[in-house]
Image (cartoon, grey):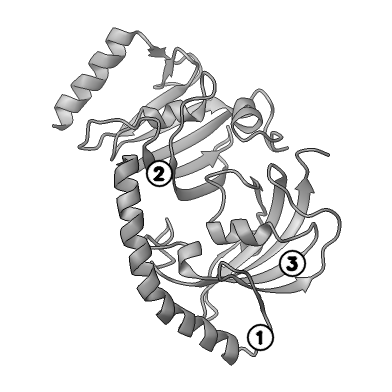
């Protein structure tokens, strides 16, 4: 099956005439639309992702100098490419189990796909390196079926997790506010200015830890603040998405996030955070670059 798939991929590329050897990156090919790519591994499946499929990818973004600035596992619905050379074309080149490295236009990715500013650590002419591992591909029907099963399971598990959350809050003598979704939060430092909006480019510091006090991630310990575009896919876990949306520039707050809004049934991509684990995040908004100043 592996060799059959390789033959099909080579044949398809040859017949379509859509790729040639990249003049910029050794051992890479380049598509007609300007995406430079190199296949790393081939899975056992042959069906590539299509628009409307729900895909789960392990994805990492790097600068041209190979400096990693984002890594995570994300599940989302694949859409038709908005323009030639978009990142959606990259995903559509992969089947389940495949992995590849792509170089795409950094300017187009941030300004056209994410509809925001290009970060200051990238030049408008730079290529963005994207490493992708295709973990799963589901049709819309398969995705809805899995979602329904998970919702029923989490409803049963939710009562138990709420007991754990309540006991922790009581043991720590914390006076917290809560959102309708179940996030508990405590402001630690007041912010100012306008509330964060979709499309804003944020620079934040955060520390994530378990209820036993052990840290699983910290930008402060690494001395590397995290920069991302608020409101766009592939950025942060759902709980942080909602939490950061309540904050103001300069604010620092603590959030207790239930598992279904944290790393869910799969755990973190690094394996450090187990599945179905509520977590604590302390987040500080260091800088906000508004989409519409």
Name the mark on residue 174: 1
Q: Position of residue 286 (x, y in %)?
A: 76, 56
Residue at x-position 78% and y-position 55%: 195
Is label 2 or label 1 in front? 1
Is label 1 or label 3 in front? 1
Q: Are marks 2 and 1 in contact (CB under 8 Å)?
A: no
Q: Position of residue 251 (x, y in %)?
A: 78, 64
N-terminal of the pair, mark 2 or mark 1, is: 2
Residue designated by label 2 = 57
Q: Position of residue 272 (x, y in %)?
A: 43, 65
User: Disc 2 on helix, strand or loop?
Assistant: strand
Q: Nearer the viewer, residue 16 or 167?
A: 167
Q: From what the image shows, is residue 292 above or below residue 279?
A: above
Residue designated by label 3 = 252
Residue at x-position 38% and y-position 27%: 38
Binning the other alpha carbons within 10 Å of mark 1 as few (below 14), some (14 to 19) or many (20 upward) gives few
Is residue 219 in sight in this rendering? no
Q: Separation of disc 1 and disc 3 at Cα?
A: 16 Å
Residue at x-position 66% and y-position 30%: 111
């Amino acid at each position: 099956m592996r060799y059959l798939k390789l033959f099909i991929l080579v044949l398809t590329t040859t017949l379509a005439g859509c790729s040639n050897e990249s003049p910029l990156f050794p051992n890479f090919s380049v598509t007609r639309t300007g995406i430079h790519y190199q296949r790393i591994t081939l899975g056992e499946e042959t069906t590539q992702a299509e628009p409307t499929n729900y895909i789960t990818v392990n994805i990492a973004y790097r600068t041209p100098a190979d400096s990693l600035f984002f890594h995570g596992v994300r599940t989302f619905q694949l859409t038709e490419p908005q323009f030639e050379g978009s990142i959606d074309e990259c995903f559509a080149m992969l089947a389940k189990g495949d992995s590849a490295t792509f170089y795409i236009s950094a300017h187009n990715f941030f300004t056209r796909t994410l509809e925001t500013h290009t970060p200051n650590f990238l030049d408008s002419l730079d290529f963005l390196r994207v490493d992708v591992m295709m973990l799963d591909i589901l049709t819309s029907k398969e995705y809805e079926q899995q979602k329904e099963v998970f919702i029923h399971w989490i409803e049963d598990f939710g009562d138990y997790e709420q007991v754990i959350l309540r006991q922790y809050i009581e043991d720590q003598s914390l006076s917290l506010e809560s959102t309708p979704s179940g996030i508990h939060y405590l402001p630690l430092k007041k912010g100012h200015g306008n509330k964060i909006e979709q499309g804003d480019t944020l620079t934040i510091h955060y520390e994530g830890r378990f209820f036993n006090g052990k840290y699983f991630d910290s930008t402060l310990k690494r001395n590397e603040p995290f920069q991302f575009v608020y409101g766009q896919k592939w950025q942060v876990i759902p709980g942080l998405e909602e939490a950061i949306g309540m904050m103001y520039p300069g604010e620092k707050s603590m959030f207790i996030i239930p598992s279904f809004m944290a790393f869910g049934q799969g755990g973190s991509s690094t394996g450090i955070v187990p599945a179905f684990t509520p977590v604590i995040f302390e987040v500080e908004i260091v800088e906000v670059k508004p989409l519409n100043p």
